[in-house]
Image: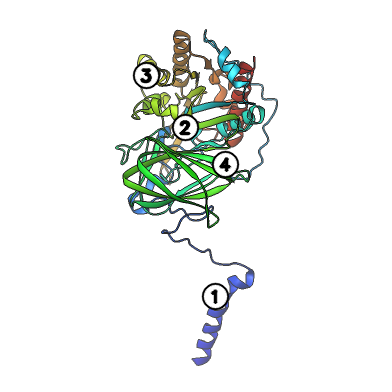
Amino acid sequence: MIARLRHIFLFCAILLALPALLGFYPVSVVSASSLCPPDSIPDDYDDDDRSDDDDDDAQSDLRSSTVTLEDGSDIHIPAGLPFLHRIPIELNGADWTDLSRRFLATDSDLFSIVNIGDSHLQADIATGHMRSILQSQRGNAGRGLISPHRIAGTNEAHDYHFTVDGRVTTSRLLRSPWQTDMGLTGVAFSPSRPDFSIYVDTKDEEGFRSLRLLHSGQITVKSIEWEGRKQDFDADYQDDCTDIFLPRPLPSLTLNIHVKGSACFFGIVLSNDCPGLYFHTIGNNGACYCSYSAIPHFAADLAILEPDLVILSLGTNEAFGKLSDDAFYAQIDELVSDIHAANPDAEILLTTPMECQHSTRTRRKGRRGRRTAVTYSVNSNCCRLRQVILRYGRDKSIPTFDWYAAAGGDGASSSWIEHQLMSTDRIHLTRTGYLVMGNMLAESLTSSLSR
């Protein structure tokens, strides 16, 4: 018996030592009370306040679908895709002479583009590619707007980290009722205690020289740290934002903040403090025209970004509803009119959604029990609502970019699926597809603004 126990003990000891012998080591878990550095376990929202479906918005329609991007992937944009068409921007009688002059003057001035949309934009794949292209041509004024999507429990772009320490209450555009004030970016968080910290990392060695913190309520920036060392800074406090100026560029930092009363935070604008071009992205899964119109003071808050050009890339989610042409026209007009009124110097560009497909699930009884069969068909509402967007542009002299036609028109979704440019949900695109999308819109923009 004793010999048998010795053998069992020796066997257990070998099992315990095996990971170390093979070079495997246990993963260390970061405390939820500590500030979350890059690549650690997220501590920026409280699991107790989230339902099981908050991680990936797994609901039944497009409003809950997300687009994600793997870091470090080298993607080749395929050439020779015959179904793609170079479509120019239709000005519809608008005069872009002054806009073009400002676009070409970025050697000594700033030019700001804001692209507003849905889940096609939230992951910032197409828009991030456009940012790279346009900033390589007109100068890099900075990363621009970053949004706390991850803090709010949803996907965000992969070229920055935006985290907080401690418990927060969060809101997302399509999750109603909102638990906090809602702001420009469509996501928001409110800290549970007056003193807390925000960590920002751009993954860019060149860093940033200043940042604009978008928030409501009264705050004080107590200190700024980088790699554990306090940094000098100047702060300019305003009603809806706080500007912070650094003596030298930093790739990351921790903001130690005191809140007087209550406050909500909506995003940060990162700047290089030099001439060039900004390309800001505001994207929210499931968003429609009416979603942004529902945000209090959305158009007025947009002025914080000082836009020269506002691009509205919406319509896909509306195509999965039962919206009439007249109702959709009215929703476009409400948002466009509000933006024009609050930003009179900004031009607006409307883009149409490309063809996509919707799924039908059928329960069938077979020999091994019931199973669900999924079939796909073209969502004809995309083409119908595309015509409404183009008609609105003609009626109101608002320029349009017909992405529906540029992507291949009728039947494009099948071609994109065949060439692995559209994802398996037949609504969103693959990463390569989004790079193609960003490349084609950037090309049309550059052509129209360089005349």
Which sits earlier in the primary sequence, circle 1 or circle 3? 1
**Label 1 – label 3 distance at C-alpha:** 65 Å
Viewer-proximal residue, 425 or 283? 283
Residue 6: image location, x then y, percent: 53, 88
89 or 2: which is nearer to us? 89
* Name of the residue lying farthest toward the bottom: 2
- Which quadrant of the structure image shows residue 69? top right
Q: Amino acid at mark 4?
A: Phe
Q: Secondary structure at mark 2?
A: strand
Q: Say what amino acid the circle numbered 3 marks.
A: Glu
- C-alpha span from label 1 to label 2: 50 Å
Residue 118 shows up from this direction: yes
The nearer-to-camera label among 4 and 2 is 4
Q: CA distance from mark 2 to mark 3?
A: 18 Å
**Tag 2 residue:** 282
> Circle 3 is placed at which residue position?
334
Up the image or down, 257 lies above or below 238; here it is below
Are the two marked residues, 4 and 2, in contact with CB atoms closer than 8 angstroms? Answer: no
Q: CA distance from mark 4 to mark 2?
A: 20 Å
Q: Is residue 135 above or below residue 254?
A: above
Graded by Cα atoms within 10 Å as few (under 14), some (14 to 19) or many (20 or more), the crowding at tag 2 reads: many
